[in-house]
Image (spheres, coloured by chain):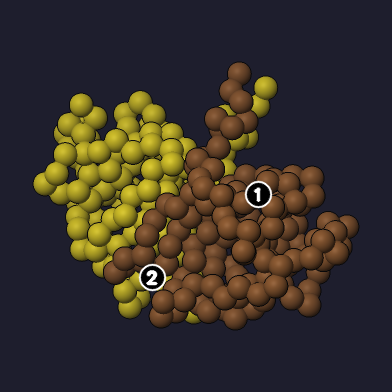
Chain colours: A brown, B yellow
Amino acid sequence: MKSEQSNLLFPKGEKLPEQWFTGNAYLQPLLARDKNNDFTIGSVSFEENARTHWHTHPKGQVLIVTEGEGLYQEKGKPAQTIKKADIINIPENTAHWHGATNRSGMTHIAISHYLGDTQVTWLNAVSNEEFNKANQ
Amino acid sequence: MKSEQSNLLFPKGEKLPEQWFTGNAYLQPLLARDKNNDFTIGSVSFEENARTHWHTHPKGQVLIVTEGEGLYQEKGKPAQTIKKADIINIPENTAHWHGATNRSGMTHIAISHYLGDTQVTWLNAVSNEEFNKANQ
């Protein structure tokens, strides 16, 4: 019988910095920017309770959830549950965060567009109060 | 015990046309073109022996293999085996085909760029001789 780990589509990759992520989040890079692809592609894994800080993308980002169940929230809107096989088309210049829930990990592919040389602008951390409310 | 089917990331989708595909190939659309995303995203599943015709992309295509093992061949080069978790960055204006092997199905996500309103130019079918040689 295979362990859950061995069924993962991609390796977990390297831990993402505490400067911009709360908890244990990991990035496995999949594709670099080049002349045809004005974006990077990576697989991002969030352990239980892990999440991005609030942030914006100047030309948007597409998430493809490949494992587990997590949360996505745009500023001023209720958090949404997102799960394996969901596609999230994040608009440009919209403050939001994504990550795991408080009881399940989540992994997504991220297609992160460039506008000039910028993919993301980081904002404040998602507070425990905000995260707890999103999990209710 | 789960069946293999229930572990698939996405539904198989609708059968792709015999005009451009040999054998049983299926498309599940995942994301439409919009102002930030100058491409479509879909999940394409090839049953054993199924493959695209030869074709070119005017601005390239990215494949992310999510299940099984298949083949990718550029004109004038040997066929390559591609498998779950492989990323294939297909250059622009390069005749190629992709699909299953003669003994295994294969599913990939395809990120298909537009140049103007064109994503693909279709060429001849991959003959049984070409496919058999690729499988050797």
Residue, disc 2: A38
Q: Nearer the viewer, mark 2 or mark 1?
A: 1
Q: Nearer the viewer, residue A50 or B109?
A: A50
Residue, disc 1: A24
Res. A53 in view: yes
The residue located at (34%, 59%) in the rendering is B61
The residue located at (20%, 63%) in the rendering is B93
Residue A62's disc is none
Residue at mark 2 to residue at mark 1: CA–CA distance: 28 Å
Left or right of A51, for residue B19:
left
Q: Nearer the viewer, residue A28 or A60?
A: A28
Report helix, strand or loop for mark 1.
loop
The residue located at (31%, 29%) in the rendering is B102
Q: Position of residue B76 (x, y in %)?
A: 11, 46
Left or right of A84, for residue B26:
left
Work out whether A37 lies above or below B25.
below
Residue B90 appears in which quarter of the rendering?
bottom left
* Quarter of the C terminus of chain A within the rendering: bottom right
Q: Nearer the viewer, residue A56 or B98?
A: A56
Residue type marked 1: Asn
Residue type marked 2: Asp
